[in-house]
Amino acid sequence: MPVELITVPCLSDNYAFLVHDADSGQTALIDAPEAAPIQAALHSHGWTLTDILITHHHDDHVQGLEALRGTARVIGARADSHRLPRLDVAVEDGDTIQVCGRDVAIMDASGHTVGHIAFHMPSEKLLFTADSLMAMGCGRLFEGTPAQMWDNMQKLRALPRDTIVCSGHEYTMTNARFALSLEPDNKAIISRIEAIRTARENGHATVPSLLSLECDTNPFLRADDPVLAQAVNMADAKPAEIFTEIRSRKDRF
């Protein structure tokens, strides 16, 4: 049986994710922004946490962890262990661990922070990216460089297109409006904005999202697309330069 995935809204615009394997009863949490809504989701399903996976050290991704820890195994980046809650398992890019009876590949996703990781569960086509690759966007570069983030965007983009991207915030409409400001006539972006608007009007989250949709509409995955390069008047620029420019524009948007 496939795992069950639940998206848990936390704080004002964060998301945590619960993954449950019915056969073993194991349940994993990806990021811990706030304990109460996560505890409520666990209680409503009768689940007990066995693993907590942390993508990066920012408070809005870890501040609920201690209230949730219990006997759960806490997993996070070795490179970030000095500023994460106490880890039981420290991992790095290229490692594979077992969570809910499935292989989970650890991927470096630095840029938003140095030490940010993503978790890829290939058998379930799940990718947990937090504040690296986001729906219609990417995280602000607090610590890493644009070149570093662009390298990691390409790595994440190379996964199968039917991968489900579980990102960490409800920023999708703002990100989409920025994407439209770059390409006002892009029909794929226009269509996605309508879908986002409908989802939000009905109280639905806009994440997870399909990687194929991100590849088609997320400008931060398209810095090497000649159509986008032309739209931002950088037809002769290198993709890393285009990524740097659009990230700078988004910071000012």
Image (cartoon, rainbow, N blue to C red):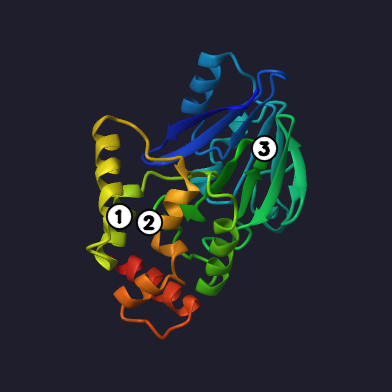
> Dot 3 lies on which element?
helix
Q: Quadrant of residue 163?
A: top right
Kind of residue indicated by mark 1: Ile
Q: CA distance from mark 2 to mark 1?
A: 6 Å
Residue 73 in the image: above or below residue 244: above
41 left or right of 70? left
Check if mark 2's residue and mark 1's residue have beta carbons within 8 Å: yes
Nearest to N terminus: mark 2 or mark 1: 1
83 left or right of 224? right
Circle on res. 123: 3
Q: Residue furthest bottom?
A: 236
Q: CA distance from mark 1 to mark 3?
A: 29 Å
Tell me where residue 5 appears, x and y as whole percent: 54, 29
In percent of the image, x 48 and y 65: which residue is there?
141
Q: Which residue is mark 1?
A: 189
Nearest to N terminus: mark 3 or mark 2: 3
Observer able to see residue 6: yes
Kind of residue indicated by mark 2: Thr
Tell me where residue 96 appears, x and y as whole percent: 76, 46
> Dot 2 lies on which element?
helix
Picture quarter with the N terminus? top right
In percent of the image, x 52 and y 56: which residue is there?
132
Picture quarter with the C terminus? bottom left
Label 3 crowd (10 A; few <14 / some 14-19 / many >=20): few
Q: CA distance from mark 3 to mark 2?
A: 25 Å
Q: Which residue is mark 2?
A: 217
Viewer-side residue, 59 vs 23: 23
Observer able to see residue 88: no
Kind of residue indicated by mark 3: Ser
